[in-house]
Image (cartoon, rainbow, N blue to C red):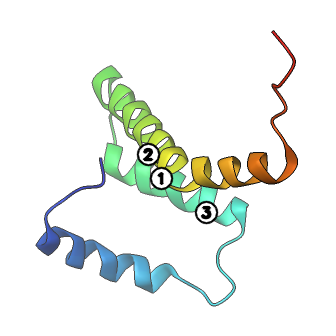
Amino acid sequence: MPYIQPNQRLKLDGVVHQLKRPSGLFAGEMNYLITRLLLAWLGPDPGYEQYNSVLGILEAVKLEFYTRKIRGYEDMKMAENGDAYTGYS
């Protein structure tokens, strides 16, 4: 979960602000950045526990992002355009 203490956020937000560009990162650049960050976090000789931790981190981020950002967008579009599942069992 991304709910860390405010003093921890300040330290990390400084890093995030350094990475921001006016036009944002391209998807490939963001993928590269996340990959390199995870590799650096893993260290030189990771084992199963560390690899499993990375998968857990990525899954938790994915689910939280979907819940907080994408779900509302999808609900809005469904209300605008109709439910694709209506009439199907």
Task: Locate residue 80, reporting x and y percent.
Answer: 81, 54
Quadrant of residue 60 within the rendered picture: top left
Q: Element at badge 2?
A: helix
The CA distance from mark 3 to mark 2 is: 18 Å
Label disc, if present, on residue 80 of the rendered structure: none
Q: Residue at x 37, y 26 (%)?
A: 52
| Residue 43 can be seen, yes or no | no
User: Residue type at mark 3?
Assistant: Met
Q: Residues within 10 Å of mark 2 (few under 14, many from 20)?
A: some
Which of 37/71 is in front? 71
Task: Locate residue 35, reporting x and y percent.
Answer: 53, 51
Question: Is mark 2 in CB contact (under 8 Å) with mark 1?
Answer: yes
Q: Which residue is mark 2?
A: 64
Task: Locate residue 18, reporting x and y percent.
Answer: 44, 85
Q: Element at badge 3?
A: helix
User: Residue type at mark 1?
Assistant: Arg
Question: Is mark 3 in CB contact (under 8 Å) with mark 2?
Answer: no
Q: Mark 2 or mark 3, which is nearer the start of the sequence?
A: 3
Quadrant of residue 11 within the rendered picture: bottom left
The CA distance from mark 1 to mark 3 is: 20 Å
Q: Which residue is mark 1?
A: 68
Left or right: residue 16 versus residue 49 is right
Q: Residue at x 71, y 61 (%)?
A: 27
Q: Which residue is mark 3?
A: 30
Q: Residue at x 34, y 43 (%)?
A: 42
Q: Element at badge 1?
A: helix
User: Residue type at mark 2?
Assistant: Glu
